[in-house]
Structure formats: structure tokens, C-alpha cells
Amino acid sequence: AFFGCSSLKRITIPPSVTSIKPGTFIGCSSLVAIDIPKSVEAIGNNAFHGCSSLERITIPPSVTTIDYGTFYGCSSLPTIRLPSSITRIGKSAFQGCSSLSAIRIPENVTLIGENAFDGCKALLALSVPSSSKNLDGGDDDNLLVADTTADMSGNCDQYAVPYSASVVAGLIADDNCFNFNETIPGGFTPRFG
């Protein structure tokens, strides 16, 4: 509907809308803010892909899934508040959100897709509940890891690394690295450089 509207800065979605279709706002590179009404129950994949000026978005508690690539390339988005209703975060959902500095994953999330936070260079804190059983969404093809040293001297990859027996053995043996795929009672908040 608004695909490629590069001059669109703001939009009001009427309360009669119940879903945002896949790709609706792809390439709306001037879109700065959007409030999604409580009537919306679904946000399709790649809905805001490439909205590089997006700084603020409100997601209502009626939404349960952040789909594949929903915020891919939203490089100006500094933070986002996910409602407790969210149960799944799809592959590449926040990939390329280079300004995203903190995000709290709701308790009900049971799946975080692979590369969900790839390219989130400013990510300083990611709070993940212990209920998130499958953190990479793939067939163990990528592991999410972080450096656990205060000064980042551990030299661990902060995003995704290819899964292999040797990589896993290296991570387990290195006290400076933290494997996000481990379940920790009560959840955890890893800190990034």
C-alpha cells in the first residue's frame, strides 16, 4: 500500500485496521514515527523493512509475533518496547537496526529466530527470559554469543557464529564467552561492549 513512499514521514493507522500486511511500508525511508492501534493483531513480514528514519513505534498488546524481517534495516530505531503478548521473534526481525541499544524480550517469547539481532552494532543490553527455549530458531546453525569480560578483552563474536562442534567446544572452554543458547534459570541480561 505504501511500498517505496520515500517522502512519507508520519501516518495514522485507523482503528478499523486489524493487520499490517507483509511489506506494507517497505522503503518508506522518511517515516519517523508510527503508532499502531490496539485493533491490529498481526504485523506481516518485512512490514517496516528499510524504514531507515524510523525512530519510534508503538506496538499494541494485541500483537503476538514480530515476523520475519519486520524491522530489518530500521537503522535509526534506538529502542523498542515489546508488549508482553509477544511469543515469537522471527528471523532477521531487527537485523540491521544499527542504532538499537537495548531491548527486553518479554517473558512469553519462546522463539527468537536466527539473525534476529544481526548488525545491531549499538546493542548494549539484551534481556532474555529463561522461557525462551529456542533462541536462534534454526537447526543449531548459528549460536548467539557475547563477550562476558567487562573490557571486551575476550574477543568473542557478539552476534552469530556458525555452529560446529569445534565452535561449541571453544565457547565452552573459554570463560570469556557466553553462549546465548544455554538456558539460565530466571533469565539473564548480557551486556555488550
Image (cartoon, grey):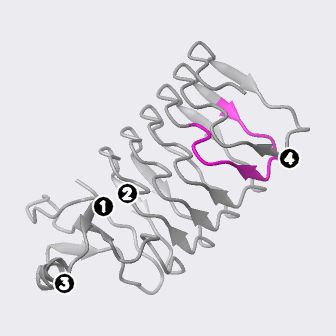
Mark 4 or 3, nearer chain start: 4
Relative to the observer, which residue lies in front, 33 or 44?
A: 44
Contact between labelled residues 3 and 4, with CB atoms less than 8 Å apart = no
Mark 1 crowd level (few <14, some 14–19, many ≥20, 10 Å Cα): some
Which mark lies nearer to you, 1 or 4? Answer: 4
Q: Residue flagged by tag 4: what amino acid is it?
A: Ser
Q: Nearer the viewer, residue 3 or 90?
A: 3
At numbered mark 4, what does the secondary structure look like: helix, strand or loop?
loop
Give the label, 4 or 2, closer to the camera: 4
The amino acid type, in three-letter code, at marker 3 is Ala
Circle 2 sits in a helix, a strand or a loop, which is it?
Answer: strand
Give coordinates of residue 83: x percent, y percent.
66, 57
Q: CA distance from mark 4 to mark 2?
A: 31 Å
- For the stretch drawn in magenta, what is the main secondary structure? loop
Measuring from the top left, give residue 94's x and y in whole percent. Answer: 47, 48
Q: Are marks 1 and 2 in contact (CB under 8 Å)?
A: yes
Residue identified by numbered label 4: 39
In the picture shown, does residue 162 fall above or below 167?
above
- Classify residue 31 as left or right of residue 150: right
Q: Residues within 10 Å of mark 4 (few under 14, many from 20)?
A: some
Residue 36 drawn above or below residue 102: above
Question: For the residue marked with disc 2, what is the amino acid?
Answer: Ala
Where is residue 91 shown, x and y percent of the image? 48, 58
Q: Earlier in the sequence, mark 2 or mark 3?
A: 2
Residue drawn 49% across the image and 43% down it: 79
Furthest residue in direction right, as rendered: 16
User: On the image, numbered disc 3 is attached to which residue?
Assistant: 165
Q: Which residues are magenta?
A: 34-48
Q: Residue at x 88, y 37 (%)?
A: 15
Task: Read off the residue under disc 1.
Answer: 191
